[in-house]
Each structure stands twice: as C-alpha cells, then as structure tokens.
Amino acid sequence: MLPYGKSFGPPAKICPMIDPSIRAHLAKEPNIAPIVAQLVIPERPDHGGDVYLGLQRSIAFQQLSGKAASTIFGRFLGLFPDGYPHPEQLLEMDEAAIRAAGMSWSKIKYLKNVAQYWLDHRLINADWAQWTDEEIITLLTAIKGVGQWTVEMVLMFVLKRPDLLPLDDLVVKRNIVTLFGIDTDTLKGKKLNEEILRVTEPWRPYRSYASRFMWAMKGTIV
C-alpha cells in the first residue's frame, strides 16, 4: 500500500463528472484512496452516446499519442460534408484521401469494416441499453480490427458503463500491480489477471472510474 503522504500530482479540483458517492466508495479502499483524493481524471468526448463514432475514434487513437491522434481524427472527420463519417459515405470514400489525412492503411480498413458491419447488422440507432457489457463485447469484437480493449473504451467512455476493468491496458495493469505490490515474478498471465481481479474487487461497481484514476497517475489519455 502506498503511503497517504505520497504526492501523485497537484491538489485536485473535484471533477464534476464524478458523483461524490463514487469517489466516496472508491476512497474506502486504502490503496486507491490517496489517488482519488489528489488526482483529477480528464474529460473525454462521449460522442453523445454514439457507439459507431466512438469506435471510429478508438481505432484512430490506437498506438498513437493523444495529440497526434486528435489531429488525424479531426482531419478524417473533415473529409465528410457534415463532419460525420456516415457508413455509406465512408465506404464510398477514396482510401487515398483518408490516407492523406494521416490514417494508416490498416486503420482505414478497420474503419471501413466498422461501417460495413453497422450496415449489415442494422446498428444505426440501436438501443445499446438492451445489451450487457459482455454482449456488446461479443457483438463488436466480431468486427475485424476491433479488439476487446477498443470495445471496453467505448463501453466506458461512450456508453458510460461504470464497472469495466480493462486488463489488456498496460497502464491500468501496471499501476494496479504497483499499488497493491503484486509479485509479477511469480504471477503471470491468467494468474496475474485473477489476482488483479481479486484485489480490485472492492472497487466494484465503479471499476471504470478506478481505471481512469490509474490512467491519471501517468497523465495518459486514451
């Protein structure tokens, strides 16, 4: 457990997006308590609950810094008359134009895969509230180029599901290991994940918010 006197950054202003009851719940767990008290988690666009746009953004941001990805994604959106990558328009768009905006060829393919999947499965205006987190992960990871981490980001930030713990995220995993002093010499792979789930059980049902505090420890934007 890290000492309460440890400084994780400048004194926090309470972030209005987090209900005080959520902060209070997380603060009961002593390992994360000083982080909750001191750090602010940054705002991030939720795209008005638009899962399609959230997926497109997550793909664009993969393996890039936040600033570079924001620039490229902004150029990408600027290719469309109303600034929105409607599935039909995206599928018809010249890939060279998207590449010129800074998107890699592989990401262009993945973006178009999402667009085609949305049309094939009639997901425009879908009621996402009817599906559990697990059902949405199963549904969307069927798209080539969309992995579990990407869908988890959409669940957390677009649909605002409160209890996601993205075990495939290296920053989240590393900071949990550090906070709880988990021995990664003896625990690896599945056993390590099981231990992380065990020690973070007190964070339920707000593990999404706890994960955001893990990113805030390094100033990471996803």
Image (cartoon, grey):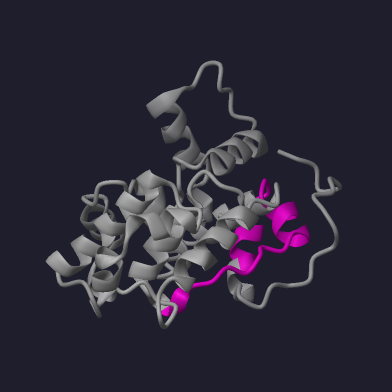
The answer to whether residue 155 is seen in the rendering is no
| Picture coordinates of residue 158, whole percent (x, y) | 43, 69
The magenta segment is: 23-48
Which quarter of the image is occupied by the C terminus? bottom right
Q: Residue at x 66, y 65 (%)?
A: 42
Q: Residue at x 81, y 48 (%)?
A: 4
Q: Is residue 186 above or below residue 50?
A: above
| Picture coordinates of residue 34, whole percent (x, y) | 75, 53
Front-most of 40 and 92? 92
Q: Can you name the residue that lies furthest to the left here?
A: 120
Quarter of the figure with residue 221 = bottom right
The answer to whether residue 99 is seen in the rendering is yes
Q: Is residue 58 above or below residue 166?
A: below
Q: Is residue 31 above or below residue 133?
A: above
Is 109 situated left or right of 139 in this image?
A: right
Q: Residue at x 85, y 62 (%)?
A: 11
| Picture coordinates of residue 88, whole percent (x, y) | 23, 72
Front-most of 108 and 186? 108
| Picture coordinates of residue 122, whole percent (x, y) | 15, 72
Q: Is residue 193 above or below residue 158?
A: above
Is residue 25 a member of the stretch shown in magenta?
Answer: yes
Front-most of 36 and 111? 111
Is residue 53 a member of the stretch shown in magenta?
Answer: no
Which quarter of the image is occupied by the N terminus? top right
Q: Can you name the residue that lies furthest to the bottom here?
A: 82
Q: How many marks?
A: 0
